[in-house]
Amino acid sequence: MTLSCHGIGIAASREVAIGQAFLLQQSFLEVVPRTIPASEVEKETARFNQALVHAKEELQRVHQHIPSDTAQDISSFIETHLLMMEDSAISKAPIVLIRQQYFAAEWALQVRRDELVRVFDEMDDPYLRTRKDDVDHVVGQIQRALQGAGHPDKQSLRGRIVVARDLTPSDIIMLKHQGIAAFVTEYGGPLSHTAILARSLGIPAILGIRHATQLLQQDEILVVDGSQGIVLADPTDPILQHFHQRISQREAREAELRRGIDLPAVTLDGTQISLLANIELPDDIITTLENRADGVGLFRTEFLYMNRTAPPEEEEQLTAYLDAVRGLQGRLLTIRTLDLGADKNLEGNGVSYLPAANPALGLRAIRLCLKEPGLFLPQLRAILRASAEGPVRLMIPMLSSLAEVNEVLKIIEQTKQALQKEGLAFDPDIPVGGMIEIPAAAISAQAFARKLDFLSIGTNDLIQYTLAVDRMDEEVNFLFDPLHPAVLHLIALTISAAKQNNIPVSMCGEMAGDPLFTRLLLGMGLTELSMQPGALLESREVVRNSHLPELSKRAASFIERLDHEAPLALFEELFS
Ligand code: PEP
Ligand code: MG
């Protein structure tokens, strides 16, 4: 075997991909001080100007290639960066350093970047303070052009496996449109939004491969094996053959699942299970319908707010929600109110705060919305107005106390009254539900269930907060365990509280879409599972082969024995 590199990381999907590596340079962080001889000043100045032009052209090209159905915020994000490239602080100031102090272009640009960032840091306005990230994006783009990497164009990325230190959700959206085969990053966990988005877009991905950008070579052939979280570099022919075979097997399996696409999600004993989709981007409605979801159990609305300088207004949101309501043609749509903060960056939207020491425990989701009515009310109004046209449920993320539940319900009531006064239509009986993502919420589920119309278990956060394991942190990822007894007890508590109060309960965390856990969750009493659209077919098949009375017995035994036996062995004994 002639593997030059073999990295183990965290799989964001179970898919396999083979392709040539494309190393995304993020090397402006590594710029070192360098001067040039006086005789090279003109040449260096021309090199800087050329890089600037090149960076602008690349950005314009990306802008032109953004499909019309992509969120408008991505477009305005790029427009802002184009304007910044025109600003003399970036386009002219480095040239002064080249001419007067003989700095190399990269170094001159880096020094100007540091000065700008210092100015932003000293600003009183918290929003302006965060604009330094834009400076970094723009400077990074010019540095890449200076170092000859440029911004990859559409052609160069098609079928390639992108290797980068880190990628944001909006990077993923752009890379998807550029036709990448897979991506590998040095940072991030399987529950990060980058990973969730990769799964939902069907892009094979491995996160958390330390030093990947140094170990992997530009253009070499890589195999990304999502089922095991490994990347193989420069594989031998027999290995390549093996993985080509795996890809064919996967395609055959998908075709087989597709043949059962129109069969109802009914268990062997005749119980109807509601299989719902998690969506975030406009295109997701198409895959939701293609995979025959019964509706949407989680519409993550954060993507409407990302990478822009002001939050979307009520009418823009209404259009997005109505598109989803209409697209679903009478199927259920569960719209979750804004969950910005923590890993879903607060940047932009006029609500930036200083970075918190523990963002996941900070001003996130409903906490932010209650603090910023200017952000929350337009969204509530838009969701309520969308409910006039189809079955919409309103879902609140990150609730931690009954006081919060009461406060939210009061605001929703006031918003309804305001709409009524204005003569704007909405569903007066719109169900309002809460996500159970914090241990306190699961323990208080009885009290929540008495006030709310439905509950939805968000295991991504529930596991993170129960086990004190940052879902983004690859160092502690091995501790992120859906089968931890404490997690399962909290899930069981929530299901039982909902049942006792006769309200629906669903699960919309990633655990709900992992076919490994479907039988356990059915046995625990869940009959509503919401997952990324690509997982629906496999879940349907598991449901159709399940016998609920049998699974209930096993789940009861599992929960009973959980505190005394090794959970994984017990799980394998009862559910595999
Ligand atoms: C969850 O926490 O499980 C969830 C579905 O919400 P998100 O992943 O958007 O935080
Ligand atoms: Mg969550």
Image (spheres, helix red, strand yellow):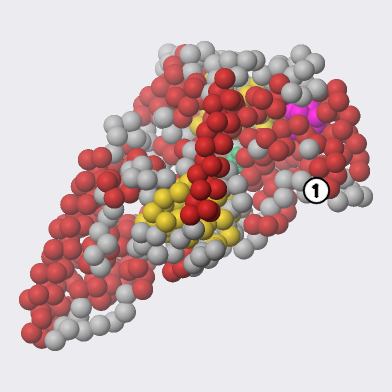
Asked whether, in this view, residue 107 is left or right of residue 365, the answer is left
x 61%, y 51%: residue: 228
Segment tinted magenta in the rendering: 521-527
Residue 465 seen: no
User: Residue under circle 1?
Assistant: 568
Q: Quadrant of ligand 1?
A: top right
Does the magenta run of residues contain 525? yes
User: 122 or 398, which is in the foreground?
Assistant: 398
Asked whether, in this view, residue 135 is left or right of residue 263, the answer is left
Expressed as whole percent of the image width and height from the top left, the position of residue 488 reads 79, 42
Expressed as whole percent of the image width and height from the top left, the position of residue 5 reads 51, 65
Q: In which quarter of the image is the N terminus?
A: bottom right
Asked whether, in this view, residue 529 is left or right of residue 383, the answer is right
Q: In which quarter of the image is the C terminus?
A: top right
Farthest residue, direction bottom: 37
Residue 91, relative to residue 154: is it above or below? below
Q: Report crowding for label 1: few under 14, some 14 to 19, many 20 or more residues within 10 A (C-alpha).
A: few
Residue 494, relative to residue 393: is it above or below? below
Expressed as whole percent of the image width and height from the top left, the position of residue 68 reads 29, 31
Q: Which amino acid type is shown beneath numbered disc 1?
A: Leu
Residue 480, relative to residue 382: is it above or below? below
Residue 574, relative to residue 212: is it above or below? above
Q: Quadrant of residue 164?
A: bottom left
Expressed as whole percent of the image width and height from the top left, the position of residue 403 reads 68, 38
Q: Quadrant of residue 458?
A: top right
x 54%, y 42%: residue: 245
x 58%, y 53%: residue: 229
User: 493 or 310, which is in the foreground?
Assistant: 493
x 8%, y 84%: residue: 39
| Disc 1 element | helix
User: 264 or 403, which is in the foreground?
Assistant: 264
Does the magenta run of residues contain 308? no
